[in-house]
Amino acid sequence: MFNYHRKTFAAICLTCLSLTSACQQVGDLAKSTVSPSSLRDVPAQRFGYRYEADVDAPPPSASETQLNQEKLSIIQTDFDKNRPLDALQTTIASPDRQRILAIYQRPEDEKSTFRLDLYDANGKLLRAITPQGLALVFTQTVAWSPDGNSIAFVGLRRLVEGNPEAEIAPTPPAIEESPTPIANANDANANNAAPETSPTIVPTPQQSVSPTPNAATVLTFITEQIYICNRDGGDLKPLTLKEGLIYFYFTWSPDSSMLAALACKQTEWISREANLSRVGRPRIIEKSGRERLLDDNLTDILPVFSPDSSKVATAFQYDVHIYDTISSVPTSAKIPLIVPFQTSSQIFDAKQGQQSNAPANNAQMQENIANNATATTTQNVQPSASFRPIVALRWTEDKTLSLQTAFVSNYGAENIQSFERWHRLNFSPQPVVLK
C-alpha cells in the first residue's frame, strides 16, 4: 500500500513538472515571436520586403517642396527698391512662414557663388547670414530644418578684395576615409577622425546691408563644407570640418536631429568635373558634428530618411541599401533588385509593344517577380529596353520606399531622362527575440 501511494505521488510530481515546463516553453515561444509594432524597432538587417513594379509616382517629399518655392514678391520688392545692384535668385520660407531666406548675388561675385540674407514675413531685412569671407554654393541644398529652428547650407572661402593673402591656403593632401562594409555598420565613430589639415580662421568684415551682422570671425575652408545657424541667423558655424572633402548634397531628417549627406574627395570631384553626374559617399552628420560614413562606394543617388528618422536609404545601380541611424549598434542591409527589375521590364515592354518576344503570360510573370525578389543571379534573362538602374528614391510612408528607374543621357548642360518608371518596396517588420 505504501509503495502504491509513493508511486502515485511521484506520478503527480512528474505531471506537475511537465506542465510547468510546457507552460514555460509556450511562454518563451510567445516571447520569441513578438513582432514590433513599427519599423523603428526593427534593425535594418532584419527588414522584410516585397517588390511592386510599375506603380504611380509618389508625392514629392517635404525637401523637394521646399526647394520648388517661387521668389516671394515682397522680398523682390525690397531688392528692387533698396538693393538694385543685388540680383535675387530665390527665396525659401521657414515652415511657419515667419522667416524667409533670400539667396542673391552681387556684381563682383563669381558665377557659382552666392550670398544668404534673412528677412521676416513682412519683407524686413533682419541680417546677413553669410559674412564677407564665406560664399554660399550649391544653392539647391539650402534648407530649413523641419522644425524651423535651424538653417543649413554649403559654403566655402570667398576671396576678399584688398586682402587676398589672408584667404589663400595650400591644398591639403587627399583625405583617406575609413571604409565601412555594407554587412556591418556597427562602428558609429569610424569616421570621426580629425581632418588632416586644420581649417583657417578668416576675419570677415560686417555686412553693410545687415543691421545685425554675424560674428567677425568664422571658420572657412577651401573645399565645400556644411554650415548651420539658428532660425534668427545667429550662431553660424561649420558642421563639417574635413578640408579636402567636398560636401555637395544633404537633406534633413524629419526629426531635425541630423543630416544625410553626400561628399567626395576634391581629386574625385575634379576628375569628374566634365561629367554632369556628381557622385559621393553617403554619410550621416548629427547636429553635434559627429559624422558616420555609411558606405565607401560612390553613388549619385541622393539619400532619403524614413518618416520616423530611424533609417536612411540610398542606392547603387540596381541595389538599395538601408542603414540604421539611431541605434547604439547600427546595422545595414543590401536589397539586390537586378532580377526583379529585369523581369518587370520584360512585362513593361510587352505591354508597350516594344518587345515582340516578350513572355505572353504576364500574370505568371508578376508572380515570378515576387518569388524571385531575393534572387541574385541574372542567368537566362533577356535584355530589355526599359531595364534601367535606380535614379531616385522617395520615402514618404513608414513602410513604403519608392524608387525610380530611368535612362539618363547628357545633353549639353542638362541631363535628360527616358524610360522613367516608379516601383515600390513594401517593408514588413520581422519577429524578434525579446530577452
Image (cartoon, rainbow, N blue to C red):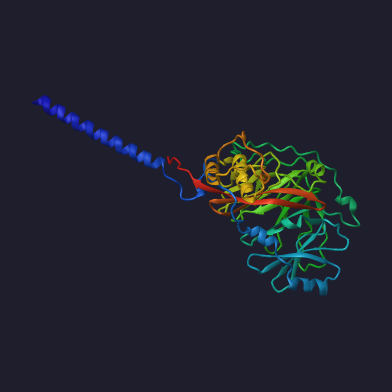
Instruction: Assign the C terminus to one quadrant of the image.
Output: top left
Q: Residue placed at 51% from the left, 49% from the top?
A: 39
Foreground residue, 378 or 240?
378
Farthest residue, direction right: 162
* In this picture, residue 412 sits left or right of residue 118: right
Residue 18 percent coordinates (x, y): 26, 33
Farthest residue, direction top: 3
Residue 173 percent coordinates (x, y): 80, 38
Q: Residue placed at 67% from the left, 58% from the top?
A: 64
Foreground residue, 218 or 417?
417
Quarter of the image holding residue 112?
Answer: bottom right
Q: 64 above or below 195? A: below
Q: 431 above or below 380? A: below
Q: Is residue 145 visible?
A: no
Instruction: Assign the N terminus to one quadrant of the image.
Output: top left
Quarter of the image holding residue 149?
Answer: bottom right
* In this picture, residue 157 sits left or right of residue 95: right
Residue 56 percent coordinates (x, y): 60, 56
Foreground residue, 287 or 364?
364
Q: Is residue 411 visible?
A: yes
Q: Residue placed at 83% from the left, 66% from the top?
A: 87
Disc count in the image?
0
Q: 144 above or below 296? A: below
